[in-house]
Image: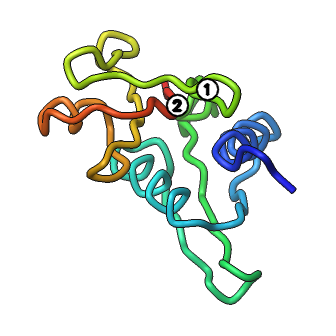
Amino acid sequence: MVTDPIADYLTRVRNAQHANHRIVEIPASNLKKRITEILYEKGYILKYKFDDAKGPQGTIMIALKYNPETRLPAIRKIWRVSRPGLRKYSSSDMLPRTLNGLGIVVVSTPKGVMTEKEARAQKVGGEILFKVN
């Protein structure tokens, strides 16, 4: 049993990139599906597919993105901010930035999961889930 499914998601992606895998398979949930869509929209992953046939909730197949010349992964660093033992919340005007706006911060708001830029534009705060560089 996994106590922190978001940390498990991030760790699977991180481990797959360190091993230079092309595809990583993750157990699905609605939150993880939305996180995958955000990573795809921002260009951190190549493509994804939701497979509902496997398991009770299905799986997410993610094709990881690498630089063709240097073979370095598109996601340089990905880390969890809010944890089950220490939740981190922020108002819309106090949301953090990463790499002065070049990375993304994913926030869970009452209007759904979104990046900090979208949350700031909609003037909603929430729980800071994780950061990506």
Cα distance between the residues tagged 2 and 1: 6 Å
Which quarter of the figure is the N terminus placed in? Answer: bottom right
Q: Which numbered circle lies on residue 130?
A: 2
Type of residue at label 1?
Trp
Residue at the image position 51 percent from the left and 66 percent from the top: 30
Q: In the displayed structure, would residue 46 be above or below residue 65?
A: below
**Residue carrying label 1:** 79
Q: In the displayed structure, would residue 88 be above or below residue 94?
A: below
Residue 31, given in percent of the width and then of the height, sits at 51, 57
Label 1 CA crowd tier, 10 Å (few <14, some 14–19, many 20+): some
Type of residue at label 2?
Phe
Q: Secondary structure at mark 1?
A: strand
N-term-proximal mark, 2 vs 1: 1
Residue at the image position 37 percent from the left and 48 percent from the top: 113
Q: Secondary structure at mark 2?
A: strand
Residue 119 occupies quadrant: top left
Residue at the image position 23 percent from the left and 31 percent from the top: 117
Identify which residue, 110 or 130, lies in the foreground: 110
Identify which residue, 125 or 35, lies in the foreground: 125
Residue 116 occupies quadrant: top left
Residue 11 occupies quadrant: top right
Q: In the displayed structure, would residue 67 be above or below residue 94?
A: below
